[in-house]
Each structure stands twice: as C-alpha cells, then as structure tokens.
C-alpha cells in the first residue's frame, strides 16, 4: 500500500506572509529554524517546506487539526535531500495507517514550490505459514555497521557493565550476554568481589572484574578506586543492573557519576540511585543515556506515575532538556529523545514485559555506544533490535512462554532477518 500527497505553494505569497514574525514560528519548529540558519529568510526555501508539510498532512489524511505544522519537521541531508521527522503524535497516525516512512521531494518552477510526499507501507517479513509479521524500519536497517574483514575485538567496542549484588547476579549476566550477541568486541563485567565466582561460572565469553566490597556483596566506596583506575580502557560504562539499593552502593554511585570520563548508560538501580539526587547530572561531562520505565521516570521527575503516563513526550523532554541526557522511556511504544528530536520504536510485544528484559536492552544499547555509534542513533537501534528479537522469540515460543533469555537467543536471528530485508531491497551495508 502507498499513500501520496501533493501540494503547490506560491512563493510570492509566502514572501509577503514572512513579513509577519509569527508566521515562521507557526510553520517551523525551533530545530528547523536553527538548521536553516541563513536560508531562513529565503522565501523559496520556506515555500518548499510549507508545501512539503502540507503534502505530508495529505498522506496522513489529517488536514489541519490532529497533526499540525509543528508535528512535522523537514530537514535536509548534506546533499540537500529533504527528510521528514515526526512527533510521536504524528507517528501514531503513521502507525495506524501501517506506513513505515514518508519520503518527500521538493521542486520549484517559476513562482511555485511543489512538494510530493509518499507514505510507504510498513515492510513485513514473516516466516512461511506464520501470522506473526515483523515490522522493519528501512532507515534503521541501513544504519547497522558492517563488520570489517580485517577487524579485531577492540574495534567493536570495550564495554564495562557495573552492577550485581548478592541475589541479583543474573542482571549483569544477561546484560553482558546481550551485548556480546549484539556484536560487542569485549565485555567486562565489574562486580562486587563477594559475588564474582558465581558471575564467572555463568559467563564464558565476558571478562569478570571483581572489585573490593568489604565482604558486603554490593558496591561500597572501597569499590571505587579500582573502577576509576580501569575506566580509561573502556569505551562505555553501563551502570545499574542488579546493583541493589544498599546505602553504601548509593554513596558509591554518587562518587562515581561525576568521575566518569566515558559515555554511560544508566538503568535499573542506577536510576534509583540517580533519583535521590538528579542534579548530580550537572557534574557529568560525558554523554549519558537513561533508560527508565514510567515509574522510574516519575521518580526522577518527582511526578506521579499517572502524569508520566498521560504525557510521555513531555516527561521525557522535560528531563532531557534539563539535564542534557538522552532519555529512552520504555513502554509499549518506547520513546527516545535528546530533548529536541523525538523517535518512537515500533517493534516489540507484550511478552517482553518479563524479568530481565530491561537488562537485555541495556546490554545492547551500551554495546552499540561502545562500538562508537552516536548515542542518539544507538538509542534508536537498541530498542529496535531488542523489540525485533522479542517478536521473533514470541513467534516461536508465544508471548506467554518467552523469557528474557529467549530475547538474547533471538538477537542473531533478528540480525539475520535484517540482512534478508537488505538483500530483498537491494541495499548494501554501511561501512564500519
């Protein structure tokens, strides 16, 4: 299925209307105005964007109302090709129409700007005789880097996962296994010394680093020097899976966070520790991604859970704008934002609401950052791959019967399906 929208706009009319300052503020978002820079005063450019937004509205079938000019952003690639970015509200309309992406072209002829928008159906690729259709994102499929034939382990990232405590060793193990299955070259699992033996038994491919814990079974201030001494050799740190909430661990976290010199991912008990003093983030100079669910997001903001649920976009944007972090707000439609741009993940299913699923996502995400994907791209790719693996697990095991380990086991199959999609579409790989 394909939806097409076409719109014509008179450049001279736009030029006249541009004399009113409120016009550009109504038509363009702050991000668009910043991206246009000197071209902001060119009426032919504004007319093209105006027409493009109108054309996208026609594809969505909303007209003026549910989706407005501020819900559709038009950016240009370095080669000048227009690209569409939608707010979650507009993306939901896309999802309801089962459209995977909108492609836009803009042209000019005399006093006219013309835009054509084409909404392309969500690509599906299901197993033979299966009713479980997989949803692919063409842009993200093309964003996975190709393995270098002459590559080496360090080239694919050195990830450290800091977590674990007595009774909760499984969380760091699942995060480590997910990172390894997602292509991370070297995974270091940093755990309190008291639980290191069981972690070493559970993990074969990861490197386990015990740090002093004063016999407590959780991180204490005594754990910090060894970590700070080693972090220069890591490309990313994932902090929190199974860490526990002992007061000594919260103190350890408060000392660790301002000392980070590498990008980080905060999840689980790391988010609980952060919620005690979110202003700690003002002291952090490296990129950070947080991965809260709605209750954790409410705790971080000091809101009620219902407030977060009522306006997830506002909650995520509020925190990202205030602290300069990327927020990956988990849920049925995981929302990703840096405070300026918004993305919604469409893969995944209710069967992924199972213990350990978040730890799996953390491992994938931190592994991608360690591999040198830009943090915002890694934050989009990780839930996409995580959800696709979850869909494949549910396809074979049912949503009721799957567990987090099944998501890990399905990651290679998810990569395989993405490769099959690329071959079907005739796309090459991005070069690492």
Image: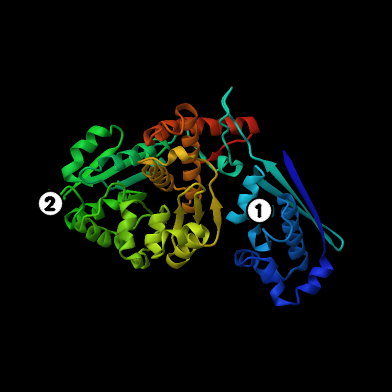
* 147 or 309, nearer to the observer: 309
Dot 2 crowding, Cα within 10 Å, few <14, some 14–19, many 20+:
some
Q: Is residue 305 left or right of residue 343?
A: left
Left or right relative to 378: residue 260? left
Marked residue nearer the N-terminal end (2 or 1): 1
Q: In the displayed orientation, state which residue is furthest to the front.
A: 306
Label 1 sits on a secondary structure element that is: strand
Residue 159: name its quadrant: top left
Q: Which residue is mark 2?
A: 214
Q: Name the image colouring.
A: rainbow
Identify the image quadrant of residue 351. Answer: top left
Name the spot of residue 386 as percent of width and height, x first. 46, 40
| Residue at 28 percent of width and 47 percent of height | 242
Residue 237 percent location from the top left of the image? 34, 50
Q: Is residue 52 left or right of residue 185?
A: right
Taking the image as drawn, is residue 147 in sight? no
* Camera-nearest residue between 355 and 148: 355
């Amino acid at each position: 299925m394909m939806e097409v929208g076409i719109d014509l706009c008179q450049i001279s009319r736009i030029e006249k209307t541009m004399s009113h300052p409120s016009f550009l503020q109504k038509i363009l978002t702050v991000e668009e105005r910043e991206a246009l820079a000197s071209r902001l005063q060119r009426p032919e450019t504004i007319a093209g964007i105006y027409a493009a937004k109108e054309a996208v509205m026609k594809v969505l079938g909303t007209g003026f109302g549910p989706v407005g000019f501020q819900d559709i952003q038009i950016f240009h690639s370095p080669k000048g090709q227009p690209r569409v970015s939608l707010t979650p509200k507009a993306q939901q309309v896309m999802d309801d129409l089962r459209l995977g992406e909108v492609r836009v072209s803009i042209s000019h002829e005399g006093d006219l700007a013309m835009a054509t928008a084409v909404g392309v159906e969500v690509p599906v690729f299901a197993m033979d005789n299966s009713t479980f259709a997989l949803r692919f994102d063409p842009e993200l499929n093309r964003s996975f880097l190709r393995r270098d034939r002459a590559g080496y382990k360090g080239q694919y990232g050195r990830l450290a996962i800091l977590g674990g405590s007595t009774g909760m060793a499984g969380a760091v193990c699942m995060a480590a296994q997910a990172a390894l299955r997602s292509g991370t070259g070297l995974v270091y699992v940093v755990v309190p010394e008291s639980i290191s033996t069981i972690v070493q038994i559970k993990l074969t491919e990861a490197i386990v680093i015990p740090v002093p814990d004063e016999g407590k079974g959780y991180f204490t201030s005594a754990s910090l020097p060894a970590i700070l001494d080693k972090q220069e050799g890591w490309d990313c740190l994932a902090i929190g899976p199974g860490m526990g909430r002992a007061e000594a661990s919260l103190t350890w976290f408060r000392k660790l966070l301002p000392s980070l010199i590498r990008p980080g991912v905060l999840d689980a008990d790391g988010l609980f520790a952060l919620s005690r003093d979110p202003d700690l983030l003002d002291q952090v100079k490296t990129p950070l991604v947080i991965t809260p669910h709605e209750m954790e997001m409410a705790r971080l903001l000091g809101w009620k859970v219902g407030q977060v649920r009522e306006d997830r976009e506002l909650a995520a944007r509020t925190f990202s704008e205030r602290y300069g972090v990327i927020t990956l707000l988990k849920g049925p439609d995981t929302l990703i934002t840096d405070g300026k741009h918004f993305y919604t993940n469409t893969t995944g299913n209710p069967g992924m609401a199972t213990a350990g699923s978040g730890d799996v996502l953390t491992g994938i995400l931190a592994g991608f950052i360690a591999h040198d994907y830009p943090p915002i791209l890694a934050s989009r790719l990780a839930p996409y791959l995580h959800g696709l693996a979850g869909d494949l697990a549910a396809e074979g095991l049912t949503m009721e019967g799957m567990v987090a380990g099944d998501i890990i086991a399905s990651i290679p199959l998810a990569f395989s399906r993405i490769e099959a999609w690329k071959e079907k579409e005739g796309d090459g790989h991005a070069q690492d």
